[in-house]
Amino acid sequence: MTPAYWKHATKELATRDKIIGQIIQQYEDAVLHSRGDAFITLARSIVGQQISVKAAESVWQKVIIAIPDITPQAIYAAEEEKLRRCGLSLRKISYLHDLSHHFIDGELDETTWETMTDEAIILQLTQVKGIGRWTAEMFLIFHMLRPDVLPLDDIGLQRAISLHYNTNQPVDKTNMRELAKPWQPWRSVATWYLWRSLDPLPVEY
């Protein structure tokens, strides 16, 4: 699934910000996609914490082999040793169990998210062990396809802004917010293209 607003957003961003416009031209055939499964998206984000993208993919593939039907119920019922053999730490297993429990109990109800603000969803998601603000923001961008998320704690975004707008000097959150004002209401799209400027291969969650 791709965002309906994407072409409109890229046109507006290109007219407002020359740097973003140049990056969009380089990657005009690329577009953000949603995997379409909220639980799997969040579970993958937990699996991928503090390890490389390659390592995270390797662990996830082992999880899929061990538990072909990945649902909250299946993960919650899985034996700890089975998940350990996939390469998951005890901490990550506890996070996955807590995430599963939130879905099973209805504390995370995706049918309500469409009517909720970004901040309300972030608040709800960060009640789950192992999900912080950054993970919740990635969920908003990559699963919910929310158009105006600015992940200030994202190292890639910080690096890209430093490179393109601040002669490779560090940038603080205040400067990032100010710089991103012209991107509204398409800050997710601008962020996605700035990521592309550092790594042409899109990361998916």
Image: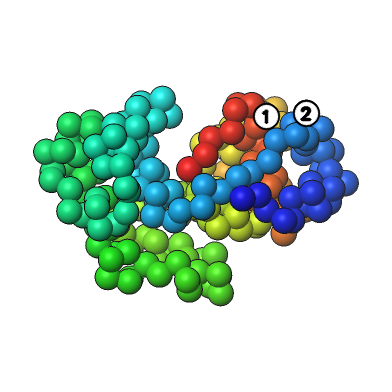
Comparing 169 with 131, the one in front is: 131
Query: In the image, what residue occupies the spot 70% across and 35% down?
Result: 30
Which residue is found at the position 65% from the left and 57% from the top? 148
* Callout count: 2
Where is residue 185 shown, x and y percent of the image? 72, 59
83 vs 181: above or below: above
Query: Which of these two is toward me, 114 or 177?
Result: 114
Q: Pinpoint residue 149: horizontal percent, then vertical percent.
A: 60, 55
Q: Which residue is mark 2?
A: 26
Disc 1 element: helix
- Which element is circle 2 on? helix
The structure's colour scheme is rainbow
Left or right: residue 60 compared with residue 7: left
In the picture, the disc for residue 197 is 1
Observer-side mark, 1 or 2, equals: 2
Task: Give neighbour class at mark 1: few <14, some 14-19, many 20+ (Cα, 10 Å).
Answer: many
Kindly check if marks 1 and 2 are in contact, taking CB atoms under 8 A apart as contact.
yes
Q: In this picture, is 201 found above or below 88?
A: above
Under mark 2, the amino acid is Gln
Q: Give the residue at x 70% y 45%.
A: 190
Relative placement, left or right, of 11 versus 122 is right
Residue 70, horizontal then vertical, whole percent: 32, 48
Residue 179 percent across, percent down from the top left? 71, 47
Instruction: Tell me which amino acid carries mark 1.
Output: Ser
Task: Answer whether residue 151 is visible to the viewer in this image.
Answer: no
